[in-house]
Structures are given as C-alpha cells and as structure tokens.
Amino acid sequence: MGKLILVRHGQTDMNVDGTYFGWLDPELNSKGREQVKKATTKLSQIHYDNIYSSDLKRCYETAQMINYLNRDIVTDKRLREINFGIFEGLTYEEIKKKYPEECERSEKEWETYNFVSGESPRDMQKRAVEFVEQLDLTKDNLVITHWGVINCILSWYFSKELESYWKYSLENGGICIIEFVDRYPVMKGLNI
C-alpha cells in the first residue's frame, strides 16, 4: 500500500492576473511562498519515499521548499501544466478578442481541442497518467505539479477519463492524497 501525495505549486503573479500560462515559467510570488510554507508544515507529518516535480520553476521551487526529508528531487516534463499554445500569456478576455474562433472551439470541444501550437487536455491526461503508472505505487510518492495535471489524475482514477476534470478544486499550495491498495485508488484527502 502506497500513497500518491499530490501538491499544487504556490501562487504566481500570473495566477493573480488570470493569465493562461501553462508552459510559461514564472516564479512563486510572496503569497505563493507563504502557501508553500503552510503546506510544508502539513507535509511534515507525512512520510514520502520519493519526490517528483514538474521542471517548471513554480513547481521546482515548491518542491525544494517542502522537501523536508532532503530526498533527491526528480523532475519530469510529463508533470507540466497543459501547453495552451497561442493562448499562452493572454487573459481570457484577450483570447476572446484575438482568437474568437479558437476560443469557441476550445470551450465546445474542451476534452479534445488541441490548442494551436499546444496540446489537448486529453494529451495532458495521457502523459500524466503514464507518469503515475510507471511509479512504484507500493511506495509513498510526493509529486509537485499543476492544477491541470492533478485534475487529470483525479479524473482518470475516480471517473471515466476526463469526465470529472472540472469537479476538483485544489488550491495553490493544496495537498491531495490518493492511497493505492493493490493498485486500487482510494481518495484520502483533498486540500489538506
């Protein structure tokens, strides 16, 4: 029996601005660092054998701060947020004005819509689940990643594919724990 401990990175200024920034690489802001400090206090009661992180700064910085057992942090690009392609760096209002047709398609066909020069939520889910499935799920694995990746993982294990993707709300610095009993996932906590 092992745990998958998912942590969402702390807040960045782009979170505050409402910017689409999947593969853009901002650092944590001061509130984000405070969120991570609170997460570290909570995590200090939870053992982990391995620690993994998205290679983007906001996650790696979060991983460095919460790594109280000083394990080697393994980065993996499969843990990156969705690549929003041409929407990167823009707010929703800017996207609607600049790319109205693409915006409409991204909403109507949200599961399979491949962002121009980016990827689709289904592609992101495939790489996220592939990452989890290659872990030793008898161990306790701490994974620092992004909202989209976490929701892809939760939706995969607790519904059908992306069916429940929009039904989870993990806050910046939030912790989610899935326990695997003979590879069967059991939700142990969300926004701990």
Image (cartoon, rainbow, N blue to C red):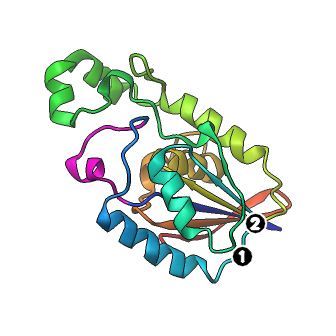
Question: Tag on residue 140?
Answer: 2
> How dense is the environment of label 2, judged by Cα within 10 Å: few (below 14), some, or many (20 and up)?
many
Check if residue 15 falls in the magenta segment: yes
Up the image or down, 27 lies above or below 25; here it is below
Up the image or down, 133 lies above or below 48; here it is above
* For marks 1 and 2 on the same chain, the one whose residue lies earlier in the sequence: 1
Quarter of the figure with residue 28: bottom left
Could you say which is closer to the camera, residue 79 or residue 154? 79
What residue appears at the point 40 percent right and 63 percent down from the top-left corner? 171
Could you say which is closer to the camera, residue 57 or residue 130? 57
Counting from the top left corner in percent of width and height, residue 57 is at 47, 48
How much space separates mark 1 and mark 2, taking CA atoms? 7 Å
Please state if 26 lies on the left or on the right of 189 as rendered: left
Question: Tag on residue 47?
Answer: 1
Please state if 165 lies on the left or on the right of 74 as rendered: left
Question: Tag on residue 167?
Answer: none
Counting from the top left corner in percent of width and height, residue 78 is at 62, 37
**What quarter of the picture does the N terminus occupy?**
bottom right
Could you say which is closer to the camera, residue 90 or residue 106? 90
What residue appears at the point 60 percent right and 37 percent down from the top-left corner? 77
* Magenta-tinted stretch: 11-22
Q: Are marks 1 and 2 in contact (CB under 8 Å)?
A: yes
In the structure shown, which secondary structural element does the residue marked by tag 2 occupy?
Answer: loop
The amino acid on which the numbered mark 1 sits, given as a three-letter code, is His
Quarter of the figure with residue 156: top right
Counting from the top left corner in percent of width and height, residue 42 is at 54, 80
> How dense is the environment of label 1, judged by Cα within 10 Å: few (below 14), some, or many (20 and up)?
some
Please state if 175 lies on the left or on the right of 90 as rendered: right
Quarter of the figure with residue 143: bottom right
What residue appears at the point 15 percent right and 34 percent down from the top-left corner? 93
In the structure shown, which secondary structural element does the residue marked by tag 1 occupy?
Answer: loop
